[in-house]
Amino acid sequence: MVGTESVYIYLRDEYHGCRALLQTALDHLRAEPPCPLPHIELRRGAGAYICGEESAMIESIEGKRGEPRMRPPYIAQVGLFGRPTLEHNFETLYWVRDIVERGPDWFASFGRHGRKGLRSFSVSGRVKHPGVKLAPAGITVQELIDEFCGGMADGHQLYAYLPGGASGGILPASLANIPLDFDTLQPYGCFIGSAAVIVLSQHDRARDTALNVMRFFEHESCGQCTPCRVGTAKAAQLMQAPQWDADLLDDLAQVMADASICGLGQAAPNPIRCIHKYFAHEVGAGPWPGDLPKPRNSPLAEQLPGGAKS
């Protein structure tokens, strides 16, 4: 026991259905409490991406602008309303009851490729059946697509994928057999994050996705620190060029990663680095590989790097 006196559940306001379900469950819990309950409050967030950062979430719950705090002190020492605070991802807490009731061996019996447990993968993009998929930890994206999503959408072949949402990086189809888990993707410059998997096909370009992601980071930056506020805007501008200035973008990425206050700015350069590492042919740093299909329907695909028409 950690002596919890108050519990705050923070939910983005866009999830109206989830909020109704949670409120109903909380009402039932309070009506028939299985044990003495702490104060439990469901807080509605305004939808800011930055409030996924733990200290920015605390600022938002306190009624302030959602901005990350400087550390130290850490929230375990001085957190919500100045009190020591433990902050957990809701999916982590979801499994506590089942693990307590069924035992750790039950949970560990799931998993693939040497990994253990279950994960909720939010799959979108060029698959037949997108959605949230409860799958074994360590499953590969190819297995996830084939077994849980009905395969690729008609007329589409796997070209690339984002394994962990906007900041998790971008990987090519040639790396579709990497186990998806918390420490398996770092050697490739990526991470699993919230396990929001986005699947791209030959009709897409990875560079377009990276630019879209950077524009998102620019919009969602809280603006508190210069490396993130200015860096994301400058990166998005540079990434619109038909041929990328690799040295300038790499330098900008290093500054953002080293000097940003929180994970948004620190992870924002991941898509840039992945494009340089795995998709250099798309940004004028090399010929289009002969074994890769050229995108046809992507908005920026009409003019391929080097001036060659598709």
Image: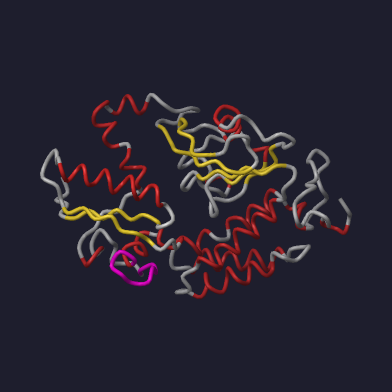
Looking at the image, which residue sits at the far right?
Answer: 308
In magenta segment, residue 304 = no
Residue at 79% over, 54% down: 301
Q: Give the camera-side residue of 22 and 100.
A: 22
Residue at figure coordinates x 14%, y 41% from the top left: 33
Task: Give the magenta-colored segment's residue range.
Answer: 60-69
Total numbered circles? 0
The residue depicted at 67 percent of the width and 53 percent of the height is 275
Q: Is residue 259 above or below residue 107?
A: below
Q: Is residue 68 magenta?
A: yes
> Residue 189 placed where, x, y %?
57, 49
Residue with the most extreme left position: 36
Residue 56: x percent and y percent?
37, 65
The answer to which quarter of the image holds residue 13 is bottom left
Residue 192 is situated, as x and y percent measured from the top left of the image, at 50, 45
- Quadrant of residue 173 within the rendered picture: top right
In this picture, residue 111 sits left or right of residue 42: right
Query: Residue 34 placed where, x, y %?
Result: 14, 38
Using the image as rendered, state which of residue 302 and residue 243 is in the foreground: 302
Examine the rendered structure and indicate whether residue 142 appears above or below residue 85. Answer: above
Rendered position, 3 above or below 153 = below
Secondary structure predominantly adopted by residues drawn in magenta: loop
Q: Residue at x 58, y 51 (%)?
A: 169
